[in-house]
Image (cartoon, rainbow, N blue to C red):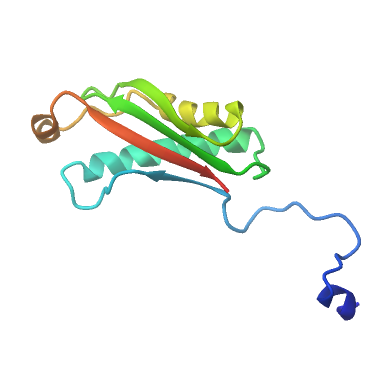
Amino acid sequence: MVRQQQQGNPLPGRKMKQDGGVKRNSIIPSLDAKRTLTGDYDYALIQAVQNRWDNLLESRSFAGERTGKVSLVFRLHPDGRVTDMKVEENTVDELLCLLCQKAIMDPSPFEKWPAEMRLKIGEDREIRFSFFYN
């Protein structure tokens, strides 16, 4: 039996499906949310999107069968609204791309910007999210 394992032969039987291990999906926003004027706001935004994306994937029993990347760009306004969302890159199917869009749109509008943030940034800002299925 040891010789078969060393030679790369799989063990007989079905693979077990169990919880645990490393998550096979992640978001990497294109901003540095540490010690900036927008840091606390951006952190809350990222968490809201990450939580919604995780819930969407879980509700569809996504098991990591697809790999790829979805990059989205949108305008974030001081009142928390999201507009002008565009798909910059999609290397997965349309359904998984739609889940990424929903992960951003479902929790919006986000919190209103603090006054200092509004004064420094102005009317809106461009935000980019990259979602990785791996």
Q: Quadrant of residue 68?
A: top right
**Residue 106: horizontal and vertical position, in percent?**
44, 24
Residue depicted at 47% across the width and 40% down the height: 131
Report the side of 107 relative to 64 (left or right): left
Please state the total of marks drawn on the protein image: 0
**Residue 10: horizontal and vertical position, in percent?**
85, 65
Q: Is residue 122 above or below residue 27?
A: above
Q: Nearer the viewer, residue 104 or 130?
A: 130
Q: Is residue 20 above or below residue 77?
A: below
Report the side of 32 relative to 20 (left or right): left
Q: Nearer the viewer, residue 24 or 50?
A: 24
Residue furthest toward the bottom? 3
Q: Nearer the viewer, residue 5 or 63?
A: 5
Residue depicted at 19% across the width and 52% down the height: 35
Q: Nearer the viewer, residue 110 or 128?
A: 128
Q: Quadrant of residue 104?
A: top left
Q: In which quadrant will I find the N terminus?
A: bottom right
Report the side of 115 relative to 90 (left or right): left
**Residue 18: horizontal and vertical position, in percent?**
71, 53
Q: Is residue 46 above or below residue 8?
A: above
**Residue 64: horizontal and vertical position, in percent?**
64, 45
Residue depicted at 58% across the width and 57% down the height: 22
